[in-house]
Image: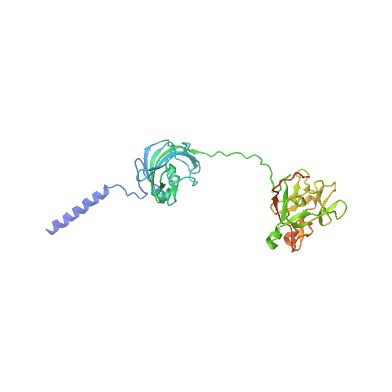
Amino acid sequence: MKTFAISAAVAAFLGGVDAIKTRAAPDVYGPNGADYENVSPDYDVSRIGIDMVKKGSDTKCKVGDWTTVHYVAKLKDGRIVSDTRAEPGNMPKVFALGAHETFKCLDNALPLLHQGDKANLSCPSFQAWGDAYTQAPLGGEPIPLGSDIDFELEVVECNRTPTRISQVNQPVTTTMQPGKCMYLHFTKGEEHTGNDLLLTVEEAEYKKGSKAVYLDHKLADDPTQQWFWNESTGAFTNAANPKWSVGMDGSNLSVTDSKSVQKWFYNSEDSIMQTNTNDGGWDVVFWGSPKPWTQVEVATHGTSWNTEGCSSTMRIEYCHVHSSKSG
């Protein structure tokens, strides 16, 4: 009796082994679907269910190339929340695959599909709209937070290489626009004392044919504080003295009636008004604490960067009323 019992137990075990051998291999990569076998070890892909409806070409969609799809997005209760053919324009969605320009579910699933494929995707919420409060593109109630989404997907086209448009030479622009009325503010006054001090021209001549340039508070529509730059000549002129141009009288900045025009430009990288280094490389500066009636001067380019008490940084503000008194 004992021998028979052992033999029966062994037979039962061996029968169980045979039964185990006949089972399918465990699905370690996530769910397989109709006419689809998931063999990707990627976790996010393992969360997506794919059922093939119609097979297209043999070439898989490649990450980085343009992809064009139509889809219908549904909640698990069957409610349609998005349909590319029913939304305004009836146009398919076009995006660079893998560039986070579409749902994460599509970015993950499409590299497994081919041009012309039609498939049904089952996507977890975190790869669709997730917990974002979103109005359904087709209208009606908002999409419930955390909703898993089913996509009826058609791969219209993929593997289109993005067209690279050759760049043409762009026009050179600067923060100092030619022929435009502008104010020039020294930024040190604004930052350290709260004084909004502007480049201003003295009304009277300190000597024949020359007027001093100094700092003063902003006065609305005061032409002595309105400046213009002539791009072709490099001349910097003042609305109150349109026929005169900014020059240098020793170390002082001045407006003169000289026929010899000093060329200026605004260095937007360093926020300074300066001459070309071929013309000596001078910066417009002032010395000491910023206050009204401070004489504006010139100094060798870069002096203010390593010299205490010397300031050169400016900002440009365009006039609200564009005067036509440019030089």
Model colouring: rainbow
**Can you name the residue that lies furthest to the left here?**
1
In front: 220, or 319? 220
Residue at image coords 19%, 53%: 12
**Can you name the residue that lies furthest to the front here?**
220
Please give the count of numbered marks on the rendered protein: 0
Left or right: where does residue 18 sit relative to residue 321?
A: left
Left or right: where does residue 117 sit relative to residue 306?
A: left
Q: Position of residue 195 (x, y in %)?
A: 71, 60
Q: Position of residue 212 (x, y in %)?
A: 82, 55
Is residue 94 visible in the rendered image? The answer is yes
Q: Position of residue 76 (x, y in %)?
A: 35, 46
**Can you name the residue that lies furthest to the right here?**
208
In front: 36, or 170? 170
In front: 82, or 166? 82
Above or below residue 294? Residue 142 is above
Q: In the picture, which quadrant includes the N terminus?
A: bottom left
Left or right: where does residue 127 sit relative to residue 169?
A: left
